[in-house]
Image (spheres, rainbow, N blue to C red):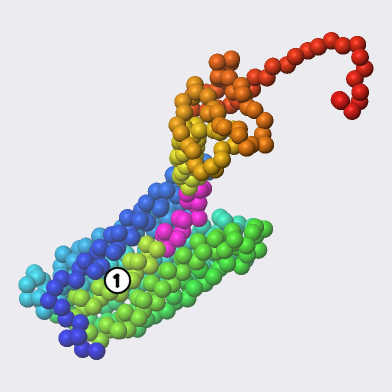
Amino acid sequence: MDSNTYYSDRNLASVLIAPHAALSLIATLFVCLRLYVSKYVTKTKWSTEEYTAISALVASHALLIGEGVAVHFGYGENITKVLEEYDGGLTNFLKAVVAVEVSYGFACPLSKIAVLAMYYRVFSTSPLIRYSTYIMASLMAGWGIAVVIVSIFTCNPVRGYWDHSVPSKCIDSNKFYIGITIPNIIFDFVTVALPIREVWRLQMGRDKKWALTSIFLMGGSVVFASIARLVLYLIFKTSENITQTLLYGNLASSSEICLAIIAACMPPCAPLLKRVLAKITAVISTSKSKRDEGTNLTDDRNRLATLVTIGQKPSRGKNITTIHEDGSFERLDDSGSLQGSTDGLYDNGACEADHKQGKWSKIHVRHDVAVEHTTEDIPMRNL
């Protein structure tokens, strides 16, 4: 693919800086939440797990600063414009590229080791996890050291990388990028798959296992970022417009680091997130209860304003009138009714209504009872 295919007159720096800045902000938030949980929720001392996450975050911010410096020297502009309009041409830009690569060599392994440290704490009783984290952390640390050394000493002498007027011998950049990316992808696959077996051995419901598995699999986004880095590099490797084409691979690299930091902090933040969700649920439930109480009170008042009838009318159509709390039942015509007279069923004057405002709790019935004395035997059938 020729360089003209990837030539743009506009500055593409925002394609790299904006996403990296946003992800760095989210990663910073998660690290802060993690430290808060450790100090105030679980009340445990900071351990290697917390310090590794902090170190990875600092290295990620250093990478973002390095990218900003590179943008200042033409990163994102087309190479022709950089050569013609920027002081020093490509010299300062290539120096900034070295700084970016060195920062990546620190930030990438630290972010993955932070994930492994989290595994070690969560699955500390599993010998497989313990030994695997030691081995993987050692390999990643060695990989990071190799990236830093090769990034600095790409050319001999070192200044030959950015000053092409100096006779120098340099390694093949294509082989270098492919050589560091493929092992990184393998590390990511192993890191994502490592805890799955242990999660499904835990004594918990299947739903909880799936939920916990999904949290760990969110780290799988790191794998996609690593693969994207390799694919983008292979697409643009023949282009000479390096001030624009290198930008896409660096975007994948910065995303990979930030996503790994976020993945390392999510499980430790679970106690705090659980508390927050519980409070939100309580607030919603309280609000719903108050709303239901208001609805019930309105229904009671509506029922209170409806006429209660006793007896029978020839016409059974609706005959609803409005009454007051201190009123009485309407007397209906008992003609044709099989029911007896209902005179004096409700006597509001005989007893003060025993109820609260808006609610009726009793119906007062008055009935005259006559008591007589007799010496005659009462037949059993009359009882």
Quadrant hosting residue 106: bottom left
Q: Is 267 within the magenta?
A: yes
Total marks placed: 1
Instruction: Looking at the picture, tell me which residue is in the foreground, 34 or 69.
Output: 34
Q: Residue furthest left?
A: 85
Q: Is 250 within the magenta?
A: no
Q: Residue furthest front?
A: 335
The residue at the point 56 percent across, 38 percent down is 313
Residue 347 x %, y % = 58, 19
Q: Amino acid at mark 1?
A: Asn
* Residue 180 in view in this figure: no
Instruction: Looking at the picture, tell me which residue is in the foreground, 245 or 205.
Output: 205
The N terminus appears in which quarter of the rendering?
Answer: bottom left
- Residue beneath label 1, please? 250
Q: Which residues are magenta?
A: 260-274
Residue 275 x %, y % = 50, 44
